[in-house]
Amino acid sequence: MEGKPGDLTDEEWASLSEAQKAEGGKLNLWPTELQASINPGFVVFLTPLVVGVFAWLRRRKKEPTTPGKIAWGMLISAVSWLVMVVAAISSQNGLDKASVAWLFGVYGVITIGELCLSPMGLSLVSKLAPKRIAALMMGGWFLSTAIGNKLSGVLSGLWDLFEKKSYFFLTNALLTAGAFLIILFLMPWLRRVYNQYVD
């Protein structure tokens, strides 16, 4: 799953579940290989739903602008981490086995955020970039994604430093919420630039 600030990779999620499986948890019923397909499955099934919601809003002249969709994507991504906060608390910080249903929950929510954020960011760059350097600007967008992926790896390396695992997920939620607030702060300028060059 790409473009998710502070996120664990699919492999890291699977590794966490594999560790529980090795201890005799109920996750033996759900192979690790299938866990890696949760996010792609949600992307396939939720894309028509998200597109349909935006089309419904467009018909009512209430569709958010592209910068607005990006802001919504960041907010929804921040909320998705709260699912894992609850999962960590309900499993008594890992003392009890956690259900794979929590992975479905977090992936379901974060995929909606991803669908609001990732394609919209590329769309915004393609609309606002000067034509002579459009390819360079798109490369810049993908570079920012690469930097985000690197930082998520750095953050996941801090897992062992958190005695209460719910705090790790809460940290992710706060970092993503911080990014949302930055976008919200920049929203008047983004809307002005967007309306000037796109509309």
Image (cartoon, grey):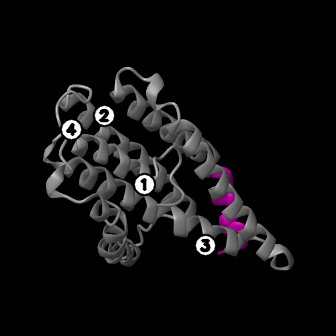
Q: Find numbered disc 2 in the image and state the secondary structure of the residue it sits on.
A: helix
Precedes in sequence: disc 1 or disc 3 = 1
Disc 4: CA contacts within 10 A as few (<14), some (14-19) or many (>=20): few
What type is the residue that disc 2 sits on?
A: Val
Report whether 69 appears left or right of 88: right
Reading the image, the residue beneath label 2 is 85
Reading the image, the residue beneath label 3 is 123
Write the residue at 25% across / 41% down.
Answer: 20
Circle number at residue 23: 4
Q: CA distance from mark 1 to mark 3?
A: 28 Å
Write the residue at 42% across / 43% down.
Answer: 78
The C terminus lies in quadrant:
bottom right
Q: Residues in magenta?
A: 188-199
Q: Find numbered disc 3 in the image and state the secondary structure of the residue it sits on.
A: helix
Circle number at residue 11: 1
Most foreground residue, 62 or 90: 90
Precedes in sequence: disc 3 or disc 2 = 2
What type is the residue that disc 1 sits on?
A: Glu
The overriding secondary structure of the stretch rendered in magenta is helix
Residue 60 image position (x, y, % from top left): 36, 73
Task: Work out which residue is located at the far top of the displayed protein and give it.
Answer: 163
Q: CA distance from mark 4 to mark 3?
A: 45 Å
